[in-house]
Image (tube, helix red, strand yellow):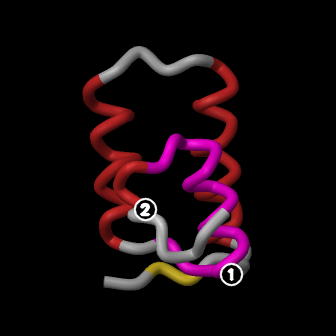
Amino acid sequence: MSLTKNRSKLSLEELYGQAMFSTILTSSDRQKIKNLLLGESLSHSEMLIIDRLLYNVRQGWLQVTD
């Protein structure tokens, strides 16, 4: 996967992969997660991905940037 791919167009699974590869969770990533949580009925696997992202932030494995 190209690192230059527009992260706002990524699926949640791709967003997770990019975030873990780069160790950065951008403001656009957070906005996408927020929109997913507020706007859609998420599957159990999608909720697990979001939970894992938050866990990784708490552990310091992902850095939150503006």
User: Residue drawn at (54%, 42%), measured in percent from left and top?
Assistant: 12
Q: Based on the displayed image, in which of its 4 quarters is residue 29 positioned?
A: bottom left
Query: Residue 58 vs residue 34: left or right?
Result: right
Secondary structure state at the residue bearing disc 1: loop
Please provide the residue range marked out in magenta.
10-25
Residue 16 covered by magenta stretch: yes
Q: Based on the displayed image, in which of its 4 quarters is residue 37 positioned?
A: top left
Residue 60 covered by magenta stretch: no
User: Residue drawn at (69%, 59%), measured in percent from left and top?
Assistant: 17
Q: Which mark is residue 33?
A: none
The amino acid marked with disc number 2 is Arg
Q: Which mark is residue 7?
A: 2
Q: Residues within 10 Å of mark 1 (few under 14, many from 20)?
A: few
Relative vertical location of residue 33 with respect to residue 27 in this rendering, above or below? above
x, y percent for residue 16:
63, 55
Residue position for label 1: 60
Q: Nearer the viewer, residue 57 or 39?
A: 39
Q: Nearer the viewer, residue 17 or 52?
A: 17
Q: Quadrant of the N terminus?
A: bottom right
x, y percent for residue 27:
32, 71
Q: Are marks 1 and 2 in contact (CB under 8 Å)?
A: no
User: Residue drawn at (28%, 40%), measured in percent from left and top?
Assistant: 35
x, y percent for residue 65:
40, 84
The amino acid marked with disc number 1 is Gly
Relative vertical location of residue 36 with respect to residue 10 in this rendering, above or below? above
Query: Residue 4 vs residue 66: left or right?
Result: right
